[in-house]
Image (spheres, rainbow, N blue to C red):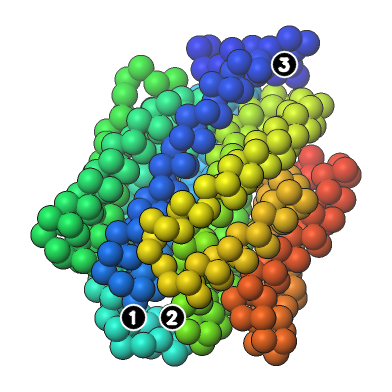
Amino acid sequence: MSASLPEGTVEAGGAGRPFSDRALFSLFWPLVIEQGLEYLVGFTATFLASSVGEAAVSGVSLVDTVMMLLIAVFAALATGGAVIAGQHLGNRRTDLATTAARQLVVVAGIASIGIAALLYAASPLLLGGLFGEISPEVRHHASVYLMLVNASVPGIALYAAGAALFRTLGRTRTTMYVAILMNVTNIGLSAALVYGFHLGTVGIGIGSLASRLLAAAVMLWLAFGRDLPVRLSFAGPVREWLDRATVGHLLRLGTPFALENGIFHVGRILVLGLIATFGTSSIAANAVGTALVLFQVLPGMSIGLGLTTVVSRCVGAGRFDLVRFYTRRIVGFVYLSQIVLSLAILALLPTLLKAYALSPETASLVWKLILVHTAGVFLFWPLAYTLPVTLRAAGDARFPMLVSVLCMFAVRLGLAWILGRALGWGVAGVWAAMVIEWLPKTALFVSRYRGVRWMRFRIAGA
């Protein structure tokens, strides 16, 4: 079967390739801006919290770790929907793609309400147990921030579902514009409440809540647009809003990735509990370092979202030769772009650290963390985190999950305790364990990709 795409979504390339270089560029650059804005919010949140004090930075960063977990889980669920819709689009089954879009929104909405309620109920356990020994001041800031941003969980889920639909259609500029609206609202409102009304952590939380709910509402409104090849529709009786077969495919693809992301971030939270025992300076350094290194991997994370669209379309059209072609091409670009961006961040680091007004001890720790992370970005990150995108988009979702869970518990958590606690390296040892974990991931994903087993998971009917 030859590669085919809905008319008007992307520009065809040569040699029977459905995506030209120009089309790939048009697909990817809005995603880079969108993800950059999302990371900028994390950067801004810690920056605004620094005006209140290092305890506020620490409290906000602890809760943001939980929010990142939820964002990752719903993004994973949305990826499952995007894979299904993309494979159906590759086979010109827009009716099935439309059904997949509706199922994704319904499932995401129901799941998000349940998770938000559970998180409210479990907040004392979260703050009192999971984060370990934190000072009363850090606990206060974390509690206030959590109560506000947890109400945004349904907004996070519905925004992710709507954005997945537009990315599948190749309309990444739409998601970029909504992301700009969300982040301008977040930064502007938070800054006004922090500096103008002196609300501190409360102001940061209100800004995050309002912007996420606004973005979800706008994204869903756009998804109902009649000009879309695949649009959101709830026509018909309520009992037909959930299709058992489609939900089954969605859960088969989305659940392993959601579990993978969930376990990954739970591991990060457990590690954060270890970091909390090193003191407020280590917590603050970890928060600032995390906000900065996200920009080092910005190209890879952003392009991964677009790669799902490319690979799922090619798989739906039965063109695995093109899957390998585009994967090789995109991995090379990720390496080049992340090396350039990492060097730029290192050059700007002295200026950035001055803006945070950190203590000399904390600033020194941030330098160590950035250098450790940069080494891993140069060597392993693109293969460890781009190849599994190809596998998932082809329907092979369980293997990346098993590899990630195995490496998290067998390598990162164990080494974090050995290097950080037993050998006394502190937070730098925890980050070294993270980078070391990328090596076995790289080896396992390269081995899987070079084989053919991942090509056997194509969605039925695609």
What kind of element bears circle 2? Answer: helix
Q: Which residue is mark 1?
A: 138
Measured from the top left, where is residue 15 in percent x and y? 78, 11
Residue at (50%, 34%) from the top-left corner? 31
Occupied quadrant, residue 193: bottom left
Q: Are marks 1 and 2 in contact (CB under 8 Å)?
A: yes
Which badge, 1 or 2, comes first in the chain's sequence?
Answer: 1
| Callout 2 crowding tier (Cα within 10 Å): few <14, some 14–19, many ≥20 | many
Above-or-below relation of 7 to 353: above
**201 sits left or right of 260 in the view:** left
Residue at position x 75%, y 75% in the image? 410
Amino acid marked by disc 1 = Val
Residue 326 visible in the picture? yes
Residue 13: x, y in percent?
68, 12
Residue pictured at 66% horizontal, 15% vertical: 20
Whichever of labels 2 and 3 marks the residue nearer the N terminus, that label is 3
Pair 1/2: label in front: 2
* Residue at the spot of label 3: 17
The residue lying toward the viewer, choosing from 150 and 177, is 177
**Which of these two is toward me, 17 or 43?**
43
Q: Amino acid at mark 2?
A: Thr
